[in-house]
Image (cartoon, helix red, strand yellow):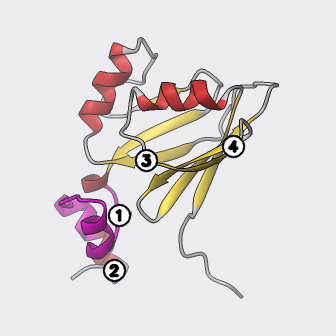
Amino acid sequence: MARLVGINHVALEVADIDAALAWYGRLFELELRGRIGDRMAFIDMGDQFIALARDRSPHADRERHFGLVVDDKAAVRRALEDAGVELTRPPNLSFRDPWGNHVQVVDYGEIQFTKTDRVLRGMNLELEKTEAALAELRAKGLAD
């Protein structure tokens, strides 16, 4: 059997690619990998990416969601508040984008998800893990 080793990308349905790029661009630094006309756009996240796919029949997800890992969760909260987006209470940070996609935001330092030193250098990031996150990684043999 094949083993799951990670997530390459997540696809979000949006009504308008340019509007979605502009909306997410207010919250995050975006690096556009490429696009396919007005049907799809791809946003790089180091060795992973988000695909934005045009869907002209918007609908809100109920429980389906995905978690974005960021280097500064507080900065994302401030940007979302400034944009007037409804949020969950701290320490959680979840929101719905204008197309109904449910997004959770987590801080890199606080979770077991990790990038290699080489990928972090390539992304020009210097990030540390909390002791709790390191303990999770150690328990799985994924950290010293």
Disc 2 crowd rating (10 Å Cα; few below 14, some 14-19, many 20+) is: few
Q: CA distance from mark 1 to mark 3?
A: 24 Å
Residue 18 in the image, given as x and y percentages of width and height: 60, 28
Secondary element at tag 2: loop
Magenta stretch: includes residue 58:
no
Q: Nearer the viewer, residue 136 or 82?
A: 82
User: On the picture, is 66 further left or further right than 111?
Assistant: right
The residue range painted magenta reads 111-135
What residue do we see at 68% from left, 85% from top?
2
Disc 3 crowd rating (10 Å Cα; few below 14, some 14-19, many 20+) is: few
Residue 144 in the image, given as x and y percentages of width and height: 21, 82
Q: CA distance from mark 1 to mark 4?
A: 30 Å
What residue do we see at 76% from left, 24% from top?
58
Question: Which labelled disc corresponds to residue 139?
Answer: none
Identify the amino acid type marked 4.
Met
> Label 4, on which residue?
40
Q: Nearer the viewer, residue 79 or 129?
A: 79
> Label 3, on which residue?
31
On screen, 121 above or below 87?
Answer: below
On screen, 140 above or below 10?
Answer: below
